[in-house]
Each structure stands twice: as C-alpha cells, then as structure tokens.
Amino acid sequence: MQIGNFHIGAANKAKEPVMAAGEAYLLWDNLVIRYDLVEIMQIYHNVAHDPDFRNLLAGDLQVWEKQINKIEQVMNKYKLPMPNRYPKSSNFPADPGIIKDQLLFRRVFTTAQDVLELCIRSLRAFVVNDELREMFADFFIKKLHVYDELCRYGKMKGWLAIPPMMPGQKN
C-alpha cells in the first residue's frame, strides 16, 4: 500500500518519491543561498554593536538554520547531491568602528526582500511535488513575519530609507 511517498508492504512495489528536475535544482539553489546567508549573518552578528539588533540577527539565524535542516532532510530523502556547507561559526576579531549597524540593517532588510521574492518564485515552480510546495509556503510565511519584524524595528531605529510622504499625507 502506498500513501504519498510512504510505503507499507513489499519493497519492490514501492514507488520512488517524485520530483521534477527543476524542483531538484531549486532545492539545491535555495540551500546554497541559505548557506551563504547564514555565513553573512554570522559575520554581521559578530560586528554589530546594538544589543537589540544583535538579538534580531540571532533570531533570524535560527529561522535560516531550521529551513536549512528541512531542505537538507528533503535532499537526503531524494538522494540529491549537497553543496558545501558554511563554517560552524564566523567569529573573528573585528574593529567595531568599521561598519555601522545602520548599514548592516539595510543589507539584512534588502536580503529579506530578495528572499521573499525567491520563495515566491520557488513556490510557483513546485508544481509536481506537493511536499516541497507546502514546505516553501511555510518558509515564505515565516520569512514574511521576519520581514514584518524588520520593518517595525527599522522604523523604530530610523534606519529604513523611507521616501518622503506626498503632500497632505499622514504616516
């Protein structure tokens, strides 16, 4: 008996899990991007000054690492090759005066916008494998919450580049 990708009974009657080639590539690409982002976020966390901003970065790192673990599990399930993983930590002595938190925040904010777009593009392409579509829909929702938190934090700190309001408009 086969229910989705789970099989009970003789192994020779089990169906291999189904995934389109484009879906396999998107998994690999999303994993590479997340590996890079974790390494960058670790560096940002290392050089950031503001304790609230450091906490925000630490929370974002947890979201990325959970998503990485889920993608790695799926790739193992489908026996897909894995890209090289990021280093465990990016601690190094840093001159705290070189980079300002506002610049780091704007890079994190722009990256969050880019990742939302990547999640949507990936969701649109996952038509064969329902599990992947559901997983990336969950990723999108979690990153949308992170993005909302970034918007609120950036406005509170005055770090967002907000265009001027139209005459007569209230914010």
Image (spheres, helix red, strand yellow):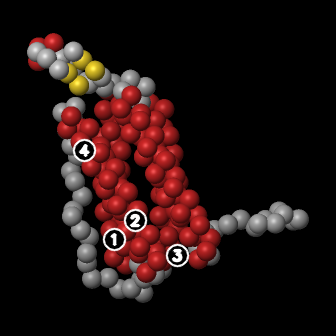
Please tell me the numbered disc located at residue 72: 4
Mark 1 residue type: Ile
Whether residue 138 is visible here, answered yes or no, is yes
Residue located 53% across and 63% down the image: 149
* Between marks 3 and 4 in the image, the one whose residue lies nearer the viewer: 4
Circles 2 and 1, Cβ within 8 Å, touching? The answer is no
Report the residue marked by disc 2.
59
Residue 61 picture quarter: bottom left
Quadrant where the image shows the N terminus: top left
Whether residue 36 is visible here, answered yes or no, is no
Report the residue marked by disc 1.
43
Compared with residue 153, is residue 21 higher up or lower down, i.e. above or below?
A: above
- Secondary structure beneath disc 1? helix
Please tell me the numbered disc located at residue 160: none
The span from disc 4 to disc 2 (Cα, nearest Å) is: 20 Å
**Which comes before the other along the chain, label 1 or label 3?**
1
Mark 4 residue type: Glu
**Which comes before the other along the chain, label 3 or label 4?**
4
Using residue 159 as the reference point, say whether residue 130 is left or right of it. Answer: left
**Nearest the camera: 57 or 100?**
57
Callout 3: 10 Å neighbours few (<14), some, many (20+)?
some
- Secondary structure beneath disc 3? helix
